[in-house]
Image: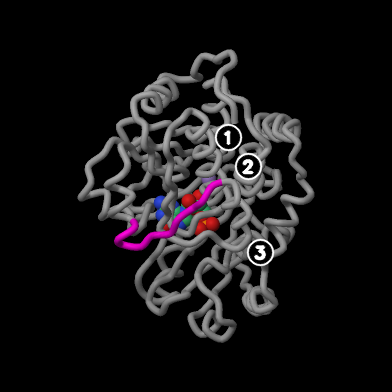
Amino acid sequence: MTAGGPQAPPASAERGAFHGFVARYRRFLLTTHVNPDGDGLGSEVAMALWLRALGKSVRVLNDSPVPAAFTFLTRHHPIEVFEPELAEQLFDGAEALVVLDTSNRQRIGKLAPVLDRHAMPIAVVDHHVTHANGFGQVNVIEPEASATGEIVYGLIRESGCVLTTEAAESLYVALMTDTGSFRYSNTDSHAHRMAADLLGYGLDPQKIHAQVHSHASAARLRFFGEVLSALELYEGGRVVVLEASAEQFQKHGLAGADTENLVDMPRVVAGVEAVALFSEAEPGKVKVSLRSTGRIVVDQVASRLGGGGHPHAAGVMLRGTRADARSRILPELHRLIAALDEKRPEGGH
Ligand code: 5GP
Ligand code: MN
């Protein structure tokens, strides 16, 4: 990426503060949420390439490993995985921390207790509605952005830097994955304009899709098949419930992160308003993933129980059995669906 060129004015005071933050420090550490996705990783790599182009030193450290689908991004910039000694070393060496794609301090996982011991200036760049105040000195939190990558793209453009193909590819991965390949309700004209602009930097969208979407193992597909064949319908076919048991994870040799995209599949069933996946990769810990096909808002269901997310995609980790988790979530979905019926005009269908 090359520095210079005309600078656009920052789109907000918070973005202005972020540019000030970047100017103030030289050695940056970047991170994202546990079980990082394409948006968290793509945003990290694009941000790292940008900061390097500005002459900064940058390290990227995450709680959890990079999934196989995204390892190609690490060719553009290395992404390191938490080890206690490495974390101490990187926190000692950094002047400032940038947290991408989460504004919840706990979501940076094993880095949170290290951060407790290394007080340092923090900037948060995120698009989640939960914890919208952020925990940084600077908080660029824009829930209207389709992806955190869209905010990073805006920041880079404001700085006057010219994107390289590598940076454009990283941002495309962020945008493409968080919008479900431009299918979900967060897809808007900004997202499509950004995608069109990124294609101008010489990336190959077909190749990127293939890289991201051709990493499933046969075991994972069998596991999906098992879970999907047991899907349950509630609320007159408007709510789909999926369950994955610890025995199923074990039988197929899979981990929690392997459920990626599973909860999105029942969206294709006609008439579905919401999907809930209760996934128990470790006995006694149930990851709940919630999706809405656009009419009901599910993030409050998750945030009331300590999780969070977006209006139409949210999650929370609950202790206890899958039955306990269901009894906390399904009545809430019932209420939201019932409220849809009340909103319906007289005589409407
Ligand atoms: P997924 O169901 O794919 O894990 O997550 C969907 C959305 O909900 C993502 O935007 C993710 O950041 C958010 N999310 C998932 N699990 C949690 C959680 O335990 N806590 C919070 N705050 N957000 C979550
Ligand atoms: Mn995101």
Q: Answer yes or no: do the residues labelled 1 and 2 have beta carbons within 8 Å?
A: yes
Q: Marks 1/2: CA distance?
A: 7 Å
The quarter in which the N terminus is drawn is top right
Q: Is mark 1 within 8 Å of ligand 2?
A: no
Identify the residue position indicated by label 3 in the image: 237
Q: Is mark 2 within 8 Å of ligand 2?
A: no
Residue 304 is situated, as x and y percent measured from the top left of the image, at 36, 52
Question: Magenta stretch?
Answer: 77-86
Mark 3 Cα-neighbour bin, 10 Å: few <14, some 14–19, many ≥20: some
Identify the residue position indicated by label 2 in the image: 175
Q: Answer yes or no: do the residues labelled 2 and 3 have beta carbons within 8 Å?
A: no
Instruction: Check disc 1 and give the amino acid type.
Output: Glu
Would you place residue 310 above or below residue 291 in this image? above
Would you place residue 210 above or below residue 162 in this image? below
Q: Nearer the viewer, mark 2 or mark 3?
A: 2
Instruction: Check disc 3 and give the amino acid type.
Output: Gly
Disc 1, SS:
helix
* Label 1 vs 3, first from the N-terminus: 1
Disc 3, SS:
helix
Q: Which residue occupies 67% across, 63% down?
A: 266
Is residue 252 visible in this depiction of the protein? yes
Instruction: Check disc 2 and give the amino acid type.
Output: Leu
